Amino acid sequence: MKQFLCALSAFVIFQTTALFAKDGYKIKIKFTDVTDSTVFLAHYYGKPLPTIYKTDSAKLDRNGYAVLQSEKETLGGIYILLLSDKKTYLEFLLNNGDDFEMTITTSKLPLGVAFKNSTENDGFIGYLKFLNDFGAKQQELTNQFNNAKNPSDSIASRNKLVAHAKSLSDFRKDYVAQHPKALLTSIFNGLEVPVVPEKGDVLPSGKKDSNFAYNYYKTHYWDHFNFKDDRIIHTPLYDAKIDEYMNKLVLPIPDSVIKEGDALLAKARGTKEVFKYTLWWLTHNAESSKIMGMDVVFVHLVENYYMKGDATWLSREELNKYFERASKIAPNLIGNVAPEIAMEDLNKVKYTLSGVKAKYTLLIFWDPTCGHCTKEIPAVDSVLKSALKNKDIKVFAVKTEGPENKWTEFIEKNNLKKWLHVYDPERKSNYRSAYDVYSTPVIYVLDEKKIIKAKRIDHSNLVSVFEMLEAKEKEKK
């Protein structure tokens, strides 16, 4: 009976605690040296300063006191208390349900803050104080190393620097071991970078593997990162982390980018904010990339995530924009057979793109009244007549806009008669949609089977594109 009553009492206590657990936050603020001002509560979203998002504000009274309070569920993270001068600020940790006090002296920031009833922030301030002392000692040891007068002094100074750097890693590891579920633990784990062993792999030939350091670093890059903690998005860590990985460690080849992007999304699957940020970042990175062929990645993401209902945060209108953009890109992806074009020249003679017989076809969409075209088209022709004169290349040039007389005058003036010039005066074709022509000039490179090999290039990289194509051809042979 006694055991039953104890169990019942524990159940009642648990239920009472759960009943009164609240969402949101309550932060009592006391400034020792600021009054009659407004303070703003803001948070990071993947990126470091100056990109922050304001969520709340409060007016300090004449005693420097204010309260920030919300009853809405709050995603934790590194939050920022920003003064109205937009220059003075401090960082602290916030979790859903927090209720604590802060006493702040702005003249002593970032260390001039004390917390009451916030164990996590006590740890955060302890870390900031450690960093302050660590930085000063690191600078002292660096100066010793730079002023070393002989090799033995250099070695001794270097060893001290290495040992001192390890103290920072040890501080973080100790905290992680003691507080495995804390927000600061996720932050420390996010800061971890792989330490490459000095002894690398040896190849069967007996030589050291020159790629060992790169492969090791890339393979272990995400070892400690907690993809399942959404709070990490409200820190300035993730954007820099994913940018280094995808743009510096992953080979800039569509297949590689797709594989690695899918792997990251799989790690983030099941979360709300980490998955959302990862999908947004990968999509934006592919869409804005200057590297040829990354539109393949964009289409892959739209078809395999947006179209399959994973982007639940987007409205139907926003989703349709992604669908429409992907539908315009999909037909003219590198590796696809170029959509057919059937047009006529000024003599009303009809020509088709598939009818052009050459090892390579340069498909150009241009406008004789377009300022950029009037510079780019002669430059392309100059490259064809010089550096590429011995290549079997023909030009299929489509006029998109402009009067016929301007067209013929430009062709005559710039000696472009060897090009096949066509247009669509009755607008019967859908070339704009098929080739995503929303501005001019637009240049594609097709092989003899009319497979798209390059797109959206200009005269400056024509030679390198053909060198790359021929190098790949030699590799196949």
Image (spheres, grey):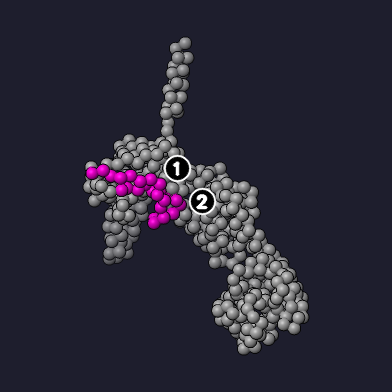
- Judge whether residue 57 is colored magenta: yes
Could one spot residue 394 in this view of the protein?
A: no
Distance CA(mark 2)–CA(mark 1): 14 Å
The image quarter containing residue 359 is: bottom right
Instruction: State the mark number for residue 277.
Output: 2
User: What kind of element bears circle 1?
Assistant: loop
Could one spot residue 419 in this view of the protein?
A: yes
Residue visible at 72% across and 80% down? 345
Residue tagged by mark 1? 75
- Nearer-the-camera pick, 221 or 96: 96
Query: In the image, what residue type sits under mark 1?
Result: Leu
Q: Report the magenta residues as a range.
A: 38-62
Residue visible at 32% across and 55% down? 86
Residue 88: image x %, image y %? Answer: 30, 53
Residue 352: image x %, image y %? Answer: 75, 75
- Judge whether residue 310 is colored magenta: no
Residue visible at 33% across and 50% down? 82
- Nearer-the-camera pick, 126 or 155: 126
Label 2 neighbour load within 10 Å: few <14, some 14-19, many 20+: some
Residue visible at 68% across and 66% down? 434
